[in-house]
Image (tube, helix red, strand yellow):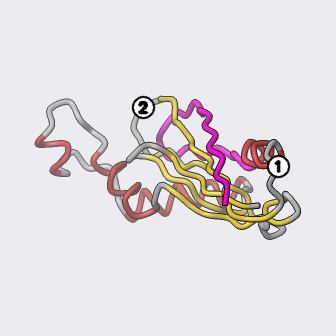
Amino acid sequence: MPVITHNFSVTMQGHSQIENISESVRRLLASTPMQAGIVTIFVKHTTASVLIIEDEPGLRADTKTVWDNLIPADPTWQHNTRNPGENNGHSHLRGQIQGQSLTIPFADNQLLLGTWQEIVILDFDTRARSREIIVQVMGE
């Protein structure tokens, strides 16, 4: 079974910013000759995550609120106190829980997402940075 790997970058601002990458993933899939299989999306950072959401403003705001409540920014996180100048311990913890990859099936060269499902990157870090996304397509 062939595997095709693509990558692209997204400029993010941190602070639980959400960026929709669905169209980028769809374009990459469409550029392959494969008709059925799976697509894996992976963000190469410990302070960012990839997930599926209904991408609308209310849920974007609610998502930020949930993470701020579950794992608040706190200067006493050990990552911050043991590494001078670091202030993103909470960002790493959030990334550990949410995760850096997901896999989506496709058929007829189309992602098999539900009506409202969108693929997004969620950036938990405390500063702006470029995020590298790997998209791997496996199929036939």
Task: Kindly identify which numbered label has been placed on residue 127.
Answer: 2
> Residue 100 or 62: which is nearer the viewer?
100
The answer to whether residue 133 is above or below residue 90 is above
Q: Residue at x 79, y 67 (%)?
A: 112
Residue furthest left as drawn? 82
Q: Quadrant of the C terminus?
A: bottom right
Q: Residue furthest bottom?
A: 114
**Residue toward you, 70 or 113:** 113
Asked if residue 32 lies left or right of residue 135, the reply is right
For badge 1, the amino acid type reads Pro
Q: Residues within 10 Å of mark 2 (few under 14, many from 20)?
A: few
Is 20 part of what is drawn in magenta? Answer: yes
Residue 60 counted in the magenta span? no
Left of 47 or right of it: where is 42?
A: right
User: For the point 82% across and 49% down, which residue is it?
Assistant: 33
Find disc 1 in the rendering and name its residue.
33
**Magenta part of the chain:** 1-22
Q: Label 1 neighbourhood size at 10 Å, few (<14), some (14-19), many (20+)?
A: few
Q: Earlier in the sequence, mark 1 or mark 2?
A: 1
Task: Say left or right for 15 vs 96.
Answer: right
Along the line of sight, which residue is nearer the eye, 38 or 49? Answer: 38
Residue 6 position within the rendered picture, expressed as x and y whole percent measured from the top left: 64, 40
Q: CA distance from mark 1 to mark 2?
A: 38 Å
Q: Position of residue 116 (x, y in %)?
A: 80, 65
For numbered disc 2, what is the local secondary structure? loop
> What residue sits 47% from the left and 55% below the top?
100
